Image (spheres, rainbow, N blue to C red):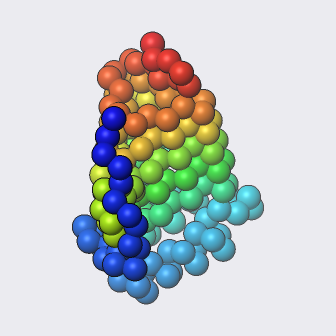
Amino acid sequence: MSAPAAPRRLRGFTGAGYDKQRGVLVQAAWFAVLNLVFVKWWLPPRWRPALLRAFGARVGERVLIRHRARVQWPWKLTIGDDVWIGEGAWLINLEPITIDSDVCVSQEAVLCTGSHRRHSPTFEFDNAPIHLESGAWVAARAMVLRGVTVGAGAVVGAGAVAHRDLPAGAVHTVGRDR
């Protein structure tokens, strides 16, 4: 049994250890593009990689990004070739997210590089990058948490939460690993 968390004192939160890497104007411009254009159904999917590149993402060839997909900070995103990102997927990349080639991130999946130090009374950040290796699949409504590497060809099944590294070829589903 672990020690109880310290009482929260959120007023003292400093945000230490989290660098957005761009100024407020660039952040505001991205949020405007994200919410007014990028997520919309009427934007052709082939234009989404170009918008990400315009804001500093490294995006490979033949990348398909469906509508309602969200990216927190494009400049902290690297995507290989032949990647699919499904409708409503959410890439919360307070730290870098690297998606190698031939990866599928399905509908409403979440990749979240952010967390908080639970024993910190001011709830300071505890962020870490995510890496999806070639051929990985993060299925519908699955979640990959901060610091996790999903190995080559591994699967995070629908609705599952990957809270630690998955080796190459592993299958992680709700309630069991195979």
Judge whether residue 18 can be spotted in this image: yes
Residue shown at 49%/35% (left/top)? 161
Residue shown at 34%/78% (left/top)? 12
Residue shown at 38%/72% (left/top)? 9
Q: Is residue 72 left or right of residue 56?
A: right
Q: Position of residue 52 (x, y in %)?
A: 47, 63
34 and 118: which one is in front? 118
Query: For the image shown, how many numbered marks are present on the structure?
Result: 0
58 and 156: which one is in front? 156
For this orientation, the residue located farthest to the left is 17
Identify whether 81 is placed above or below 35: above
Judge whether residue 78 can be spotted in this image: no
Q: Position of residue 55 (x, y in %)?
A: 42, 70
For this orientation, the residue located farthest to the right is 42
Identify whether 165 is placed above or below 24: above
Quadrant of the frame with the C terminus = top left
2 and 138: which one is in front? 2
Quadrant of the frame with the N terminus = top left
Identify whether 89 is placed above or below 134: below
Q: Quadrant location of residue 80? A: top left
For this orientation, the residue located farthest to the top is 178
Residue shown at 51%/40% (left/top)? 143
Q: Position of residue 138 (x, y in %)?
A: 51, 34
Q: Is residue 6 left or right of residue 52?
A: left
Identify whether 138 is placed above or below 128: above
